[in-house]
Image (cartoon, rainbow, N blue to C red):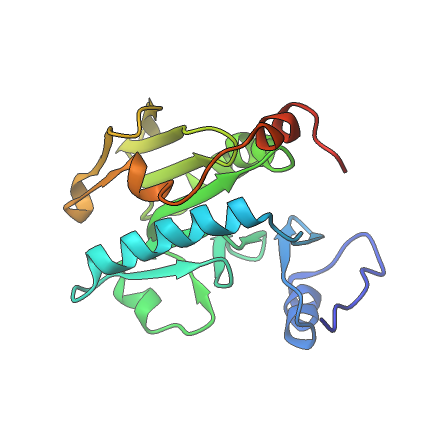
Amino acid sequence: MGELPIQKNTYSIEEYLALEEKSEARYEYHQGEVVAMAGATVTHNEITGNLYMKLRASLSGGSCRTFMENVKLEMVKDVFYAYPDVMVTCDASDLDDNLIQRFPILIAEVSSSSTQIIDRVTKLRRYRQTPALKYYLLVDEYDYWMELYTCQDKQQNTWFYQDFNDLEEEIDFPELDLKIKLSEIYQGITLTQDNTEDATNPQE
């Protein structure tokens, strides 16, 4: 893969961007700390793909674009950068930038045993700082379960929480004029006992 080893504890933003430019691997940047992105399971990949294809097909022809995994998000300039599993942006500034997105309206993460704390705490807090974000969607890798945080008031940083665990339930994204059924995201995926065991007994 041409991955470059992490050789020190703290990187400046310039060093981080230079590292990414020279490497085929992806790294997230958290206040000077550089974190290499780990590989994903087949289930994670399939769920991510289903969500990406549903969003892209539903929003095609409009002013929004959908990205999956390999597009960088600037959460806080020079401080936090990440690679969401899926994100949607409708902002003209993002449409003109071929490297970094800054104003997504929707971010989604497929949450596993190794990422659930980061996704539900660290990234939730940081993603809410992005100025245009309206929806943060968490999709569980081990169970038919999705969680949606919807911004109610940006100035007050007020968010409304919902969770869904019925495959026939619809998740509504009114700002995008879009509804998605859980069954569409988990289409073709059978959650096995191995998935459940992995969730309760994560292996490093």
- Looking at the image, which residue is at 28% across and 52% down? 54
Whole-percent x and y of residue 177?
A: 14, 46
As rendered, which of 72 and 154 lies closer to the eye? 72
Residue 126 visible in the displayed image: no
With respect to residue 13, does 10 lie above or below? above
Q: From the viewer's perspective, is 95 left or right of 194? A: left
- Looking at the image, which residue is at 44% across and 58% down? 68
Whole-percent x and y of residue 71?
A: 48, 63
Whole-percent x and y of residue 172?
A: 21, 36
Whole-percent x and y of residue 110?
A: 48, 41
**How many dots with numbers?**
0
Residue 69 visible in the displayed image: yes
- Looking at the image, which residue is at 43% across and 36% down? 139
With respect to residue 145, does 189 lie above or below? below
Q: From the viewer's perspective, is 26 left or right of 204? A: left
Q: From the viewer's perspective, is 110 left or right of 196? A: left
- Looking at the image, which residue is at 20% across and 55% down? 58
Could you tell me which quadrant the C terminus lies in?
top right
Q: Residue furthest right?
A: 7
Q: From the viewer's perspective, is 150 left or right of 1? A: left
As rendered, which of 17 and 148 lies closer to the eye? 148
Residue 152 picture quarter: top left
Could you tell me which quadrant the N terminus lies in?
bottom right
